[in-house]
Image: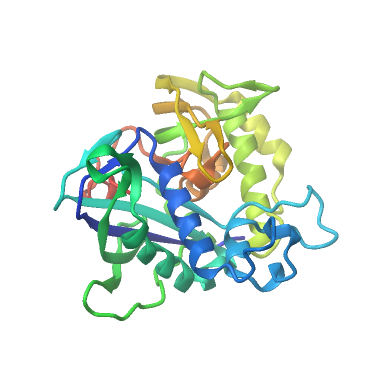
Amino acid sequence: MLTTHHLTFTATALTAVALGEQSGSALRGAVAGALWGRFCANRAAPACDQCPLMGVCPVAALLAPMRDEGQKGGEQRPRPYVVRPPRDGARTYAPGEPLRFGLALFGSAAALFPYVVMAAGELEREGLGLRLPQLGGRRGTLRLGEIAAVNPLTGEHQPLYTAGTGQVRQPGLPIDAGAVRAYAATLPADAITLHFHTPLRLIEQDRLLKRIALRPLVQRLMRRLDDLSIAYGEGPLGIDFRALLELAEGVRVAEDRTGWVDVVSSSSRQQRRTPIGGLVGSATFAGELGPLRELLAWGSLVHVGKNAVKGDGWYSVVDPCAAPTNAEADLAYAL
């Protein structure tokens, strides 16, 4: 299976910092740009897959991973991380305000944590968010205050770096199959609510899914988790895909409180705009959910659907009859 490491970054705005409605794209672009700027050793190469250093390059390992020779499914592997943007929506942070975001690393990619830390530090120099007229067309600047490891399933929190100490600890609190299984067993087997924090963008029969349904979510989630486990874990899932899809087909939507939002991601490097909108809100599903609980718990850790690396498809799974716990409230901003 797979192991995940979840991190939160806490920063303070030094100038105004403006973020859009779905700021995961901006965060992913900033981290990617910092990685390229700091660690790319062959900028003359037109792309990672045309660089002779690709097999030993941390930039390529995080941003442009390729499948091993002989693996099926094309050349590109899923990227071994996702970002988790602030959940404040479109807003401008005033100087002195805190800004927090999350990032998860999957499986063997946890070894690249030092590069992620250095890239996050580059945000202090390069800035983040929209370019602002009052800053002379530059992005807002911030100061990184803390990096912490967290467990979204339990609420555990472990500081890894604090400004001024100069020391960074290797991330702890790994989440493995046993932890996911134990959490899933605490969920009800007949009704589950999913809270979609960022847009869920699924394709069903070549069309965008604009009304929530469990079967296409489960189908895409099984494929994503299988791909991640092959690339960064212990190999294929070894589950009965057909049986789980049949179960998901029989689960009904008991309450739908989702709505569609249109969001566009802009890439200055590639000079193009990409739609990253989808369904947000919450939905309660009822039916035979026992065998699906573990899979849905995994989805809350790795995201599901298109643009997952940019923060889309992030949800939490809860008991619809339970009151929110303190851990859920404390982690709501990023986990």
What is the quadrant of residue 92 in the picture? top left
> Residue 81: x and y, percent?
52, 56
Residue 256, visible in the rendered structure = yes
Of residues 212 and 208, the one nearer the viewer is 208
Left or right, 237 with reference to 20:
right
Residue 185, visible in the rendered structure = no
| Figure check: 90 above or below 140 | above
Residue at (85% x, 59% y) in the render: 70
> Residue 198: x and y, percent?
41, 36
Q: How is the image coloured?
A: rainbow
Left or right, 271 with reference to 45:
left
| Figure check: 205 above or below 78 | above
> Residue 178: x and y, percent?
51, 62
| Figure check: 74 above or below 166 | above
What is the quadrant of residue 245 in the picture? top right
Left or right, 255 with reference to 207:
left
Of residues 155 and 189, the one nearer the viewer is 155
Residue at (82% x, 51% y) in the render: 72
